[in-house]
């Protein structure tokens, strides 16, 4: 007997390369600054933005290093895989604090090689080789929040 996995419906259809790049950016920010994943993101095909809570504004050099690191990860041609776990099993490997109260019992876990893992119901590429090149457009910092705008180029 096959068990039917039931997930929450997703309210938006992301552009898979950009959405996958957002995951890599989130993990890069977490590793470099110890900040949580973006609490506010607007992911679109042409350009996107993410907000991060930081105690101080990153330098131009740090922003360049973020961009370099994101592209380094993309260039590794990492597989993007999906697995389904219960909340209990997922809690050992991902931060569940962003999930809505009405989230389904089964969670969809997205892994980007060994670099990133998170619960997500959005669309992703199958390999980071499908993303292209990550490029910051600009950023601004105010009252503890860094907003970065970025795009993907071939």
Image (cartoon, rainbow, N blue to C red):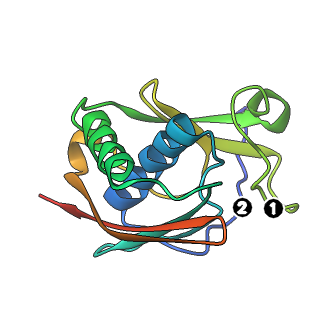
Question: Label 2: which residue?
Answer: 8
**Residue 4 in sight in this render:** no
Q: In this rendering, is residue 97 above or below 49?
A: above
Few, some or many C-alpha atoms within 10 Å of disc 2 (few <14, some 14-19, many ≥20)? some
Q: Nearer the viewer, residue 99 or 6?
A: 99
Report the residue at 46% width, 29% height from top. Answer: 115
Q: Nearer the viewer, residue 71 or 5?
A: 71
Q: Which numbered disc covers residue 150?
A: none
Question: Label 1: which residue?
Answer: 100
Q: In this rendering, is residue 145 above or below 60?
A: below
Report the residue at 32% width, 74% height from top. Answer: 47
Residue 97 x, y percent position in the rendering? 80, 50
Name the side, left or right, on which 16 lies relative to 134.
right
Assign a secondary structure to mark 1: loop
Report the residue at 46% width, 41% height from top. Answer: 28
Distance of label 2 from label 1 (alpha carbons)? 10 Å
**Which residue sits furthest left?**
154
Few, some or many C-alpha atoms within 10 Å of disc 1 (few <14, some 14-19, many ≥20)? few
Q: In this rendering, is residue 76 above or below 151?
A: above
Name the side, left or right, on which 151 lies relative to 42.
left
Q: Earlier in the sequence, mark 2 or mark 1?
A: 2
Q: In the figure, residue 92 lies in which quadrant?
A: top right
Report the residue at 63% width, 46% height from top. Answer: 35
Quadrant in which the N terminus appears: top right
Residue 76 x, y percent position in the rendering? 25, 29
Is there CB contact under 8 Å for labels 2 and 1? yes
Name the side, left or right, on which 79 lies relative to 154.
right
Quadrant in which the C terminus appears: bottom left
**Foreground mark, 2 or 1?**
1
Residue 29 x, y percent position in the rendering? 51, 45
**Residue 91 in sight in this render:** yes
Q: In the figure, residue 46 lies in which quadrant?
A: bottom left
């Amino acid at each position: 007997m096959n068990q039917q996995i039931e997930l929450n419906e997703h309210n938006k259809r992301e552009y898979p390369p950009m959405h996958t790049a957002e995951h890599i950016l989130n993990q890069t920010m977490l590793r470099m600054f110890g900040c949580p994943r973006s609490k506010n993101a607007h992911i679109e095909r042409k350009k996107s933005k993410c907000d991060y809570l930081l105690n101080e504004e990153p330098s131009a050099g740090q922003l360049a290093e973020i961009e370099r690191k994101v592209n380094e990860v993309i260039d590794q041609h990492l597989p993007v895989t999906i697995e389904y776990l219960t909340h209990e099993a997922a809690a050992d490997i991902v931060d569940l604090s962003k999930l809505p109260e009405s989230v389904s019992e089964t969670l969809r876990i997205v892994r980007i090689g060994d670099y990133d893992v998170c619960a997500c119901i959005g669309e992703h590429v199958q390999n980071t080789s499908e993303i292209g090149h990550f490029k910051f457009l600009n950023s601004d910092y105010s009252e503890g929040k860094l907003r970065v705008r970025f795009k993907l180029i071939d």
